């Protein structure tokens, strides 16, 4: 500890007791700033006999415990707090945050005395924080999810879901996720190759178009597709006349796959691009020196070294596709998937928490299974390039035919994205898309012309605040 008083138990005990005296021990329904004085008073731990008295009282008794039993005492206190809060449905208030901080500091000191991690207080505190975060925000919700899955009628795992319908939505979800995983990983690989092996003088432009869909959620991509290719889309009449497609061709499996591929390819691109940049080009140059052809170099050296990145890309994209429910709601039509059904069983007309929990458990198992397959696929090999010096070369040029194919595909991708986001931008200035295309500024006046407390400003400001708060926490945990 940098300051001597921080290493004294009396400091942390005093901090917790001060928080107990000044802050609510029980959660407030409307937060500290929006609650009334009466609500804040009733939430204070000392205004009534409740569990918080025992928690803070046991912490205050910590100095009386023999030294060799103190660590076990603190761990027992943490267990008692969690179990008693769960069984009594005690919702933690602000004072409990300081109680947790005090327990974290005291446990850190006890572990440092036992020379865990060489007695490094910072490392021990970081480890404990990560373990607590994983337990509270990941393991506990997962356990609750599995327990809730058996809370339906007669303990049915999927509530009122019929086996036939369950099989249908499982197959639908897996078909979409696996198709999107393959397409996004393939396109991410091609765009990473284009950025670093073809467009060497215009990498910034290629990165912009490769990452453009990342700045918008899949829902917005689905909206753009609807404006372009939906029932009232400006390209739909041409597709119906010259392509033989129906007016509703976009809605269902096809639309979800297109929207997810557009939205998730940038994630695959970032993962593969990082691996491609780290490859040592001298190995490719040595193979070329030994008379290996360009296709042979690519398929026997470059591509195998990208195998872990391709597997990671596929894993992340599949999980993201499985979990997304906004795009299937917009473009799914009668094509039901697991994520949308979970939402409808929680927030829809037919509330069925057992079915929602069972489907959520399935999503978790599918994600874990895909991760396990990815791990088994890449664990057998070594993918480290070994050389005496790092290479500044960007790698060998791609074969001419391959470079042409990749360039053509990237051009089509860029053109499609320009049309997609151009449709969204243009549609915001029309009276009624698909019916009345008269240009107007009325939509922007309603959103931004009514002051900061109305229209789009409240949601915009809250979004920025949440992002600003989440970014440092995420970076610190990472």
Image (cartoon, grey):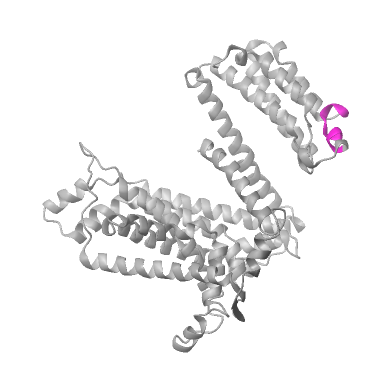
Q: Is residue 106 left or right of residue 272?
A: right
Magenta part of the protein: which range?
A: 39-48
Residue 342's spot in the image, x, y percent? 66, 60
Quadrant containing the N terminus in the rendered view:
top right
User: For this rendering, which residue is in front, 357 or 157?
Assistant: 357
Q: Is residue 93 left or right of residue 303?
A: right
Residue 382's spot in the image, x, y percent? 30, 44
Q: Is residue 141 above or below residue 38?
A: below
User: For this rendering, which residue is in front, 462 or 377?
Assistant: 462
Residue 225's spot in the image, x, y percent? 52, 71
Q: Is residue 309 above or below residue 60?
A: below
**Magenta region, main secondary structure:** helix
> At x 36% / y 52%, what residue is drawn?
273
Quadrant of res 352: bottom right
> At x 45% / y 67%, what residue is drawn?
417
User: For this rendering, which residue is in front, 71 or 162?
Assistant: 71
Residue 66 visible, this angle: yes
Residue 454's spot in the image, x, y percent? 72, 57
Quadrant of res 233: bottom right
Residue 336 visible, this angle: no
Q: Is residue 458 left or right of residue 303?
A: right
> At x 61% / y 53%, what residue is drawn?
361
Q: Is 78 within the magenta?
A: no
Q: Is residue 188 above or below residue 284?
A: below
> At x 57% / y 38%, what residue is drawn?
473
Residue extending farthest to the bottom is 241
């Amino acid at each position: 500890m940098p300051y001597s008083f921080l290493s004294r138990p009396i400091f942390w005990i005093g901090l917790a007791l001060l928080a107990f005296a000044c802050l609510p021990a029980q959660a407030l329904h409307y937060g500290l700033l929006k609650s009334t004085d009466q609500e804040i008073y009733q939430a204070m731990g000392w205004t009534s006999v409740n569990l918080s008295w025992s928690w803070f009282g046991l912490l205050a008794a910590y100095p009386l415990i023999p030294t060799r039993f103190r660590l076990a005492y603190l761990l027992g206190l943490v267990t008692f707090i969690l179990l008693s809060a769960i069984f009594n449905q005690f919702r933690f208030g602000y004072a409990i945050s300081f109680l947790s901080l005090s327990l974290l500091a005291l446990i850190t000191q006890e572990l440092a005395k036992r020379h865990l991690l060489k007695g490094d207080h910072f490392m021990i505190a970081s480890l404990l924080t990560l373990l607590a975060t994983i337990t509270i925000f990941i393991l506990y919700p997962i356990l609750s999810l599995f327990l809730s899955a058996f809370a339906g009628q007669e303990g049915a795992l999927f509530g009122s879901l019929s086996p036939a319908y369950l099989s249908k939505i499982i197959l639908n979800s897996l078909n979409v996720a696996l198709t999107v995983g393959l397409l996004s990983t393939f396109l991410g690989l091609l765009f990473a190759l284009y950025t670093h092996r073809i467009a060497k003088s215009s990498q910034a432009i290629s990165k912009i178009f490769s990452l453009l869909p990342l700045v918008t959620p899949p829902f917005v991509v689905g909206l753009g597709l609807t404006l372009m290719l939906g029932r009232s889309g400006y390209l739909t009449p041409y597709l119906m006349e010259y392509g033989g497609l129906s007016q509703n061709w976009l809605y269902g499996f096809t639309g979800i796959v297109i929207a997810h591929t557009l939205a998730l390819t940038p994630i695959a691109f970032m993962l593969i691009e990082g691996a491609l940049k780290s490859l040592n080009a001298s190995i490719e140059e040595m193979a070329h020196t030994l008379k290996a052809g360009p296709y042979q170099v690519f398929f026997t050296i470059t591509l195998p070294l990208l195998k872990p990145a391709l597997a990671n890309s596929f894993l992340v994209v599949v999980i993201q596709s499985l979990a997304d429910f906004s795009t299937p709601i917009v473009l799914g039509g009668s094509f039901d998937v697991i994520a949308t059904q979970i939402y409808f069983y929680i927030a829809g007309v037919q509330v069925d928490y057992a079915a929602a929990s069972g489907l959520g458990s399935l999503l978790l198992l599918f994600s874990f299974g895909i991760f396990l397959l990815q791990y088994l696929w890449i664990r057998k090999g070594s993918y480290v390039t070994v050389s005496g010096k790092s290479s500044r070369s960007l790698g060998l040029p791609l074969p001419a035919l391959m470079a042409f194919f990749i360039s053509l595909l990237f051009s089509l991708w860029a053109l499609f994205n320009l049309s997609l986001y151009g449709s969204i931008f243009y549609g915001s200035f029309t009276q009624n898309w698909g019916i009345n295309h008269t240009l107007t500024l009325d939509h922007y006046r309603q959103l931004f012309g009514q002051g900061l407390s109305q229209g789009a400003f409240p949601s915009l400001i809250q979004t920025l605040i949440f992002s600003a708060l989440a970014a440092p926490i995420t970076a610190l945990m990472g």
